[in-house]
Amino acid sequence: MCLVVNVKGISVYVDKSGEGNQAVILLHGWGQSSNSFQDVRNFLKDAFTVYSVDLPGFGLSNKPNYPYNTQDYAEVLKGIIDEYRIQTPIIIGHSFGGRVAIKYTALFNQVKKLILIDSAGIVHKKPLTYYFKVYTFKFLRRLFSLPILNRYKKRALRRFGSNDYKQADDLMKQVLVRVVNEDLRTDLPKIKCPTLLVWGTNDYVTPLKDAYIMKELIPDAGVVEIKGAGHFSYLDNLPYFLRVLDVFLKEDK
């Protein structure tokens, strides 16, 4: 079922499926949409009512009407939860969606369980290699504007540039800059619900060490590593992820 809710003056798309007593909310990563959780949604819908959200600026939802920060996204989630009278949901967030889930749970503390997959939220001091990549990307963008080199453009820019920033329009670039610079460490101790941290051992976007930083700061948290998986660990080894999910949510069906 396709739902549209007006929150903070914009239309937000929500896909609702299943008729279980317990609600589960799925929050996708940056540059993705609710479709990225399609397999997870299909797995859960027989036992839960699943709300898969297109966060503002992605999928079928409107863009924000100003440069959001993480709290703005958390307030959008609160608006959805209030609109559909969802009681103590289980929230599953990947990457940027995990960042939103952290902020929402810390602010409102009305979550039954939290599952963070390769979640953003920990900000590290950037090494010199980061700045090398940024300036190399800017140079390559100019260089590959030449038609003769265009065939190599995608591969080179993927290596040296930030696809998230490169593909965003001006407003969403402002949003991205705001949210990626927010360190949520002070929010983590405010999370009181059982929390599962699922991480790919080869995640180089939000490295595995972030999972253990979060584990130390969240009062009731555990880590499950998915060996050999990257930043989309739940898709890199979907059968294993679904087994982990099934065990963690067994008592909530």
Image: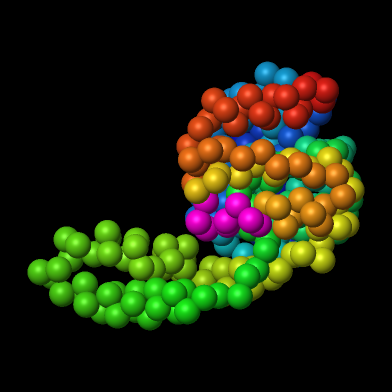
In screen coordinates, is 249 left or right of 130?
right
- Residue 49 percent across, percent down from the top left: 73, 28
- Residue 211 percent across, percent down from the top left: 68, 52
The reply to whether residue 35 is visible in this rendering is: no
Which residue corresponds to the image point at 82% horizontal and 66% vertical from the top-left?
186
Which residue corresponds to the image point at 61% horizontal and 40% vertical from the top-left?
225
In screen coordinates, is 20 left or right of 129?
right
Using the image as rendered, state which of residue 247 and residue 106 is in the foreground. 247
Q: Is residue 9 magenta?
A: no
Residue interval drawn in magenta:
203-210
Using the image as rendered, state which of residue 112 and residue 172 is in the foreground. 112
- Residue 220 percent across, percent down from the top left: 85, 44
Which residue corresponds to the image point at 24% horizontal and 64% vertical from the top-left?
153
Using the image as rendered, state which of residue 84 and residue 165 is in the foreground. 165
The reply to whether residue 38 is visible in this rendering is: yes
Note whether 190 is above or below 245 in the view shown: below
